[in-house]
Image (tube, helix red, strand yellow):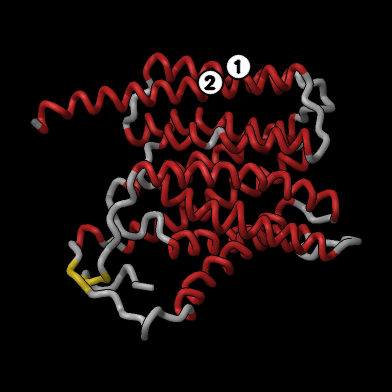
Amino acid sequence: MSNPQSPAVLPAAAPAVPVGRSLLHLVVAGIAWGTAGAAGSLVFRNSDMGPLALSFWRCAGGLLLLLAVPALRLLRPGRGGPATAPVATPVPRSAVEPRRTRLIRIVGTGVGLAVFQTAYFAAVESTGLAVGTVVTLGAGPVLIAIGARVTMGERLGLGGLAAVTGALAGLAVLVLGGGGAEVRLAGVGHAVLSAAGFAALTLLTRRLGRTGATGAGSLAGTAWTFGVSALVVLPLAVAEGLLPHTEDAVRLLLLLLYVAAIPTALAYALYFAGAAVVRAATVSVIMLLEPVSAALLAVTLLGEELTATTVLGTVLLLAAVTGLALAEARTAAERRRGEEPAAA
């Protein structure tokens, strides 16, 4: 792999990922993420592993899988002869990610990812898959919209403000009307913390993606992010207990392998690539696929019950994020109309 800090003569850079393909990346990532909580719930049911240990093994496993990808490419035999090295062509120095920017991106997204997924697993363990996922992904767009307004000047507008208000109302319904057994306050708190981590890494990825640097969304960058996350979680995971006790070690190993491969190595690689191109609010809307798929798995696979209050709070949250999608579409249309005269 090329070193981003090497001189500004690199292998021919791939063209910018088209928006359509970036959206597809995000769709696949959202669906894959929706299965992570279900797999985590099964891990908790089949062992005494805690959320910190699960988060560590998820990051460590994802890191190993991502590191294996370049090795497999090198081992793959060429067609019709030795592999031909890519022709080195000059790349503008502005396209090379500065060292400081690269460090901020790796550390920032690594810490954000550690908070996001560790708190999410804690929420799932405490209050269940459906509620934990809905609160996390319902609060996430609210924090993203507010953060994008503060850090990047993205306008919220009346529609966005109404959507944020609706999301807070849905969250209040879930917390205050959950009936205790179905919705636990501690689990909701973990879910909100998880949403804050998700919002932070989403905003950072998008902000740095605006620079057009080659490191944003790269496979190596994602691997570095997993490495930082694993290091952040490791001390706490050791205190919690890294090696779980279980009566079915094979089943647990398969679950951990699935968590590391599909909703981690694959999903995050696609997510970071897509989030570097697509606007932050749009990313949050597409990620609605996660709570929807997670809720379906919670009912069909895990046997969780959705009370009327839970359904109402979920509907309010999802409707609020849909409102953010409409506000996002209007903002994008207004921006295009404003740029058309200048382009003519």
Left or right of residue 208, residue 196 in this image: right
Looking at the image, residue 52 lies above or below residue 286: below
Disc 1 residue type? Ala
Name of the residue lying farthest toward the right: 247
The residue sitting at 44% across, 25% down in the picture is 325
Badge 1: how crowded within 10 Å, few (<14), some, or many (20+)? Answer: some
Return the mark for residue 279. none
Helix, strand or loop under label 1: helix
Q: Which residue is mark 2?
A: 320
Q: Nearer the viewer, residue 128 or 340?
A: 340
Q: Which residue is mark 1?
A: 169
Looking at the image, residue 329 lies above or below residue 246: above
Q: Mark 1 and mark 2 in contact? Answer it, CB < 8 Å.
A: yes
Name of the residue lying farthest toward the left: 344
Left or right of residue 205, residue 340 in this image: left
The residue sitting at 40% across, 45% down in the picture is 22
Q: Quadrant of residue 130?
A: top right
Q: Earlier in the sequence, mark 1 or mark 2?
A: 1
The quadrant of the picture occupied by the N terminus is: bottom left
Name of the residue lying farthest toward the bottom: 82
Helix, strand or loop under label 2: helix
Query: What is the spatial separation of the Cα atoms under label 1 and label 2, in whole angstroms?
Result: 9 Å
